[in-house]
Image: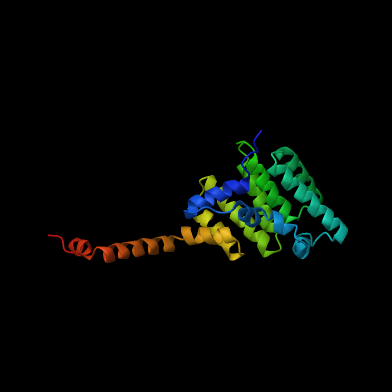
Amino acid sequence: MPLKESASTHDANLVGILLGSTMDGEFVRDEIAGVHRSYNTDTSNECRASLSSEPIDEEQLHLLQQRELEAVHLAETGHIEQAIAQLTQIIDEYPQYASAYNNRAQAYRLQPSTGNEQLIIDDLDAAIRYADNRQMLGRAHTQKAIVLREMGQNEDEVFYNFSQGAKYGNEIARMAVARENPYAKLCGKMVTEAMRQLRNPAAAGSAKNPQ
């Protein structure tokens, strides 16, 4: 039985549509879910920052990271309900652990259409609220922008969250902002028109001086 399309793969396709180009799935996974970077030994301080109100020793932190990684793997292999249950357990034990909210939001997005959009937004808001580092803020804002766009929400709110994602260093958000910035769009139209006139000055002149 084929595996369901992951949320990060879907985001890769969506951003490809937004930006008119394709993107690597592993890159999107890093930037949106933070699966690899969150479990890199160099980011233990980042994880600890999210748990700053609940001191945890190195051994407990390592076990927590492993549990979260297992939950992400469950989601990626189609065991969505188990992944959500495991991430929920982590959140119950460490309610200020931003990464678990961000990953649970992704797991919710892998479910068949069940009208769970508000659960997703609530988790992403919690991830933003509890995040104590730039990478997590970037991931959560970027994922929220993508979800809001899928929901057909106000473009200003979508652009705001992409802008925040870009502000905190998320590469997907930076590319989306460059594409979606209304001033950039206007500038792009002006450049396109200028190039058209350069290629065909006679047509441009006749347009300015109609008979």
Left or right side of 89 for 140: left
Q: Residue 169: x and y, percent?
A: 61, 64
The reply to whether residue 31 is visible in this rendering is yes
Image-quadrant location for residue 31: bottom right
The answer to whether residue 57 of the structure is visible from this angle is no
Dividing the picture into quadrants, the one containing residue 43 is: bottom right
Q: Quadrant of the N terminus?
A: top right
Q: Is residue 178 left or right of residue 207?
A: right
Q: Is residue 85 above or below residue 20?
A: above
Left or right position of 151 against 79: left
* Front-most of residues 5 and 126: 5
Tell me residue 127's x, y (percent).
68, 55
State the residue in front, 25 or 104: 25
In what quadrant of the picture does the C terminus appear?
bottom left
Disc tally is 0
| Residue in the picture at 83% in, 57% down | 61
- Considering every residue shown, the one lying at the far top of the view is 1
Residue at position x 39%, y 62% in the image? 188
Color encoding of the figure: rainbow
When the figure is inspected, residue 151 is found, relative to residue 211, above or below; the finding is: above
Q: Position of residue 50 (x, y in %)?
A: 75, 60
Q: Residue furthest left?
A: 211
Q: Residue 174, percent across and down?
A: 54, 62
